[in-house]
Amino acid sequence: MSEKPEHFIIDGKRLDGRRRDELRPIKIELSPLDRADGSCYLEWGRNKVVAAVYGPRELHPRHRQNMTGAVVQCRYNMASFSVDERIRPGPSRRSVEISKVIRQAFEHVVFTKFFPKTAIDIYIEVLRADAGTRTAGINAASLALADAGIPMRGLVSACAVGKVDGEIVLDLMKEEDNFGDADVPVAMTSDNRITLLQMDGRMTTEEFYKALELAKTGCTTVYELQRQALVEKYDNEYQAEGGLDE
Amino acid sequence: MSEKPEHFIIDGKRLDGRRRDELRPIKIELSPLDRADGSCYLEWGRNKVVAAVYGPRELHPRHRQNMTGAVVQCRYNMASFSVDERIRPGPSRRSVEISKVIRQAFEHVVFTKFFPKTAIDIYIEVLRADAGTRTAGINAASLALADAGIPMRGLVSACAVGKVDGEIVLDLMKEEDNFGDADVPVAMTSDNRITLLQMDGRMTTEEFYKALELAKTGCTTVYELQRQALVEKYDNEYQAEGGLDE
Amino acid sequence: MSEKPEHFIIDGKRLDGRRRDELRPIKIELSPLDRADGSCYLEWGRNKVVAAVYGPRELHPRHRQNMTGAVVQCRYNMASFSVDERIRPGPSRRSVEISKVIRQAFEHVVFTKFFPKTAIDIYIEVLRADAGTRTAGINAASLALADAGIPMRGLVSACAVGKVDGEIVLDLMKEEDNFGDADVPVAMTSDNRITLLQMDGRMTTEEFYKALELAKTGCTTVYELQRQALVEKYDNEYQAEGGLDE
Amino acid sequence: MSSGDNTVMAEVQRDHLFNLVLKGERADGRAFDEFREITIETDAIDTADGSAMVTLGDTKLLVGIKVQPGEPFSDTPDKGVIIVNIELIPLASPDYEAGPPREGAIEIARVVDRGIRESKSIDLTKLCITEGEKVWIIFVDIHVLNNGGNIVDAASMGAIAALLNTTIPAARHDLGEDTPLPVRDIPLAVTTIEFGGEMMLDPSLDEEKIASTSLIVATNTDGSISGMQKLGAEPLMIDQVMRVIGMAQTAASDIRKKFLEV
Amino acid sequence: MSSGDNTVMAEVQRDHLFNLVLKGERADGRAFDEFREITIETDAIDTADGSAMVTLGDTKLLVGIKVQPGEPFSDTPDKGVIIVNIELIPLASPDYEAGPPREGAIEIARVVDRGIRESKSIDLTKLCITEGEKVWIIFVDIHVLNNGGNIVDAASMGAIAALLNTTIPAARHDLGEDTPLPVRDIPLAVTTIEFGGEMMLDPSLDEEKIASTSLIVATNTDGSISGMQKLGAEPLMIDQVMRVIGMAQTAASDIRKKFLEV
Amino acid sequence: MSSGDNTVMAEVQRDHLFNLVLKGERADGRAFDEFREITIETDAIDTADGSAMVTLGDTKLLVGIKVQPGEPFSDTPDKGVIIVNIELIPLASPDYEAGPPREGAIEIARVVDRGIRESKSIDLTKLCITEGEKVWIIFVDIHVLNNGGNIVDAASMGAIAALLNTTIPAARHDLGEDTPLPVRDIPLAVTTIEFGGEMMLDPSLDEEKIASTSLIVATNTDGSISGMQKLGAEPLMIDQVMRVIGMAQTAASDIRKKFLEV
């Protein structure tokens, strides 16, 4: 466990050299897993997460089925070695809550009505955690859903905003998350409809408004990266299948 | 944890000033909860318990249904803060046993045959425990069943008897229960049919007979209080609905 | 916990006086339990195990049923007082694994096809454990299956072989198991088809071959004892029923 | 009953409430920003080190606090610990089942917990007995007795009311004299639901069931925000969130003044 | 099989047993106050610190005692601990299932436990090693092998027989010399069922299934009562209870003399 | 999908693979003793004290090692502890379910565990910090990401690769300087399936499903055997077992040289 730094922002630069409104580097790999119907591996700073989607598929036990649409299910899990102190395998209160809010982040965008009685299962595994695993997981899951061909209104993009040294900053790194003043994870669609919103810490109303606006620009950047990853994949497949000749 | 007192009875008076055959004060409030089909809040000395009844209602899973009558179910639970030392939430071996004997205390009086395939659920929550929570719970549950309109042969009334300083006394308080020689919880119908009987401690046959006879008078007193509470409630409802004009 | 002995074999004799290829004494009692469909009590050295078989019988829940044959199930369990250090009741990772390999030791010999949708349940209780409880359990279960009248290709017989002081020996006793170099439990049919094979420790290929050959002779001896127990039982029953006059 | 959620009756009720909203009304006659009747009775349970019985309309719950010495977390060796637990016992609703807490109960407990923790209402460093070895553990157990809707707000009121009422039982553990638990702020979580395009405070059970989405906002005495949680599938726009924050601040301030700053 | 409880066969059997009772008879020819054959073999398991194998008619069970040093309960720092556990393993009956102990097993274990504890048969203060820190924990594990009815009485006999046979393994734990466990009394629980207006001791499996109610009474060498538990829905009158107590005392006295006071 | 195991499609596939075997072929063109492509990337996760990402054909898994001080087992007070755990998380296969590890996962973990432990690859006495009080506990957590068949062999490679890559984090715990974990041998478990009378290494998912039986053999650098486990109902003859041992030794030796002895 590191110590609280004296300052988080020095000469306009954060501890890892980023500007206040700058995201950590993001790397996306689509379809790394072939058993799942869709999957995505995503690195975000030092976070490493993988998401897989199965479905629509039969839902058991039957009494959990919904006659009028698919049931979206989500399991967010951290590998026992993904953090400094080993985590006991199995669900924790934290992971149960995060699984729930992630599920609800997608219920609006998935066209569940097309698939009554089925389940759409989203699995997120955190292999290496830095701050922001839930938002990293959402971004990966969003792409895994697309990769699985699940019909959606659009992608969901997520990032956190927070407050350190009295300033609103984008995409908290671990020290900022642990010792900062506030953390606000946000997920939204490309037309800025918020599907996940949580808040930890303490902020004034004005600060909070600034934070949401900053989250909007962060999510827009993430959305562009997600879109680009999908375009590249389909370009590659198109060419692999013979391009115009097909 | 208090120390064992040197004497439990001094000049014919017990530690809280009661006579050997005297009950602690009882206070009854009917229908305090509106979600349940019937409910009752009861104070007995420093015990505070609340009972609620749901049913007859559908019983899941189906293989637990009885084709020829309702299944009576009971859950006795102590709030974690109801005693000096915090109790971990969830069932304990003690609460499982007490739930079972309370359930059996009612199986005789409820006309289960009228409601095949259903469940009648009795929930008892101990909010503040002194000695005698199971008998307090039974008295409250009996009234909650009546309040829910469940057809019954009659009310069940309960109290404990015990032995301290070599004497048989009615309705043990906490010190008498912890440090006394014997504790006998009893539940019976108004015609003295015993539906719950347990015993802890050591007694001769003669003492035990005296104890049961004392329990009988205790239960009769309790029954009168229960009856009065029901009468008052129906009087009030009758007047609220317009009395004779209705 | 005893200390590791300096030598396991002195003048060709093992710690309990046995030769390298000698089994501990085995005692078999058929049908000791009348609730089960078949049962067997077996002592093997200081091991005491009892096996019971129920079935073929209905299998719940239904989704576990196999339309084309009986499902063989096995539960191996050690009584909490069966070893020096008390065991917590309930399944352990060890007992789950042993239950599985024992089940598979029988799946080949039981004619499961005759009994679609049913379960054949094998229960093994270790009352007193020395080394070799799983093989003792298999030998008892084999007889309990026969006692229950379950149609089988033949009996399964089991014993362990191992390595101590660099030599291959039959049927490890506790010290040999705890401090020896290797332990190989084996189960086979009377025509030497291996249905269970596990190995712990370290052996060369040559040693392992010798071990398997020794296991074969051990299993043959066990088979003779099993067969004899069954013959005696049926002889007794035949005479009890009136012999030739019947 | 819960199986009836998708039935004709549910449809009819939904339509009825929707039509009311169009007219600016609620089924029980309240204004959109109006709470149901609140009562808070502290010192309800003398075996607890602090307690409060809360009613909010038909909702009824009991919060009991137990304070015990115990080990600190390894990453905060000089701080006490707060553990918030909620029991949605089957006595309180036909929809609750016995068993370990489910998703919903865990979420509520964690939201209430964060509201208290993040507001820094309790100075956890004052709960240290011996650094790295022994600190005071504060168990906040929320026992729901009747679910009439909006458990979160009732739990939040009950938790802070009970904490304000709590004594650290140092004498009982031979650790000096009993002292009141030092509480520095009064955080309150307020739930707003969105339905038919309108925002409403303090949802009743029926309103809760048909809400498209809801947003819980925890605010402090100085109006600052110390917790937020969006529930439900429908999305919210930034301006809606800001509007809800304003409603929550006003409502929390009212409740704080009326019931908690005594 | 258990699903057959409500079937025609169950009806027929019930009628048959009822007709027998009217004639003062039981299916196996016993008198109403007569026990089935009992055998008690102690020292059955040498890995246990005490043990007893009991057969009671078709019922067969094994009791093993383990004595280990451990921490006392905080409210009785100077007393040893007795923990009675019963395993109704699926080997013993087609009606038992694998898994954690259910209501029935917990009740039996607790009734047997109270019979021993409340009789003060074991002087728990003699099991204190270091006050507040270390005491002897006595695990009484009851392993049912064949359920032929009346598990409680068999378990009660087995538990006290095994305790009488128990050595405190002090040497193994470097805590002095081994000593026999000091047992001061021989409590025995006896079950009486009510059926057709008659009271019968030691119910067989079939009788147990059709009993309206049953009463377990634990008595001591001096005839005093140290435990009681009513099971089943049918009520009992005070005079019936007193009659049952008499039957239990006589039966316990017989068993004690024949099998336990050697 | 798993419900399709007994269907016509499964029959057809079985027949197809059987016909291939008769011609000495496998569906993916491999020889019977040929492994699929292997990659092992160590140091994959910097929060772990050692780690390895393994791909074996379509199978993908991640092994992370955590080394922590803790108490030794009472019967081995001077030895460190290895705990192998495998998580068959539902992300990795449509057939896996969330929940505590089942029979299959427990068996794999125990087989991999024994392979390492029995080979004496890790000198556990070197992991003792204070005898009887504190030793290093080595948690080997195997996280399966994609089940493409033959999890055991991939897990075995990953476990030893990660152990070879492990540092004992003594400095973090104020217990001296960090040192590499001392690994003395490179045990490898190799799975052989029997199908249509033939023995095949490294079964794909389809082959695994139709195998009659399989035998896992763990061997060491010197060719000695340090673990074996037969799975499946079909029996094996002694000569078959010996043949499998030879195949496993050769395959393990190849993999060891190519990937692990660097």
Image (cartoon, coloured by chain):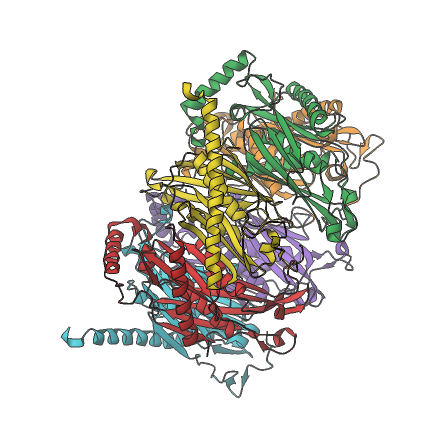
Chain colours: A orange, B yellow, C cyan, D green, E red, F purple
The C terminus of chain F - image quarter? bottom right
In which quarter of the view is residue E256 placed? bottom left
Q: Is residue B225 visible?
A: yes
Q: Is residue B73 left or right of residue B172?
A: left
Residue extending farthest left: C245
Question: Which percent across, then down, holds residue F243?
Answer: 44, 66
Residue nearer the viewer, B138 or C142: B138
Residue extending farthest front: B11
Q: What residue is at 69 percent from the left and 34 percent from the top?
A: D160
Q: Is residue C127 above or below residue A177?
A: below
- Count of all numbered marks drawn on residues in the image: 0
Residue extending farthest bottom: C11
Q: Is residue F104 left or right of residue D168?
A: left
Q: Is residue C95 visible?
A: no
Q: Is residue A167 above or below residue B201?
A: above
Residue nearer the viewer, A3 or F165: A3
Residue nearer the viewer, E197 or D74: E197
Q: Is residue E160 above or below residue F179?
A: below
Question: Which percent across, then down, holds residue A197?
Answer: 64, 29
Residue extending farthest top: D23
In which quarter of the view is residue F170 placed? bottom right
Question: Which percent across, then down, holds residue E98?
Answer: 43, 56
Question: Which percent across, then down, holds residue E198?
Answer: 31, 58
In which quarter of the view is residue B25 placed? top right
The N terminus of chain F - image quarter? top left
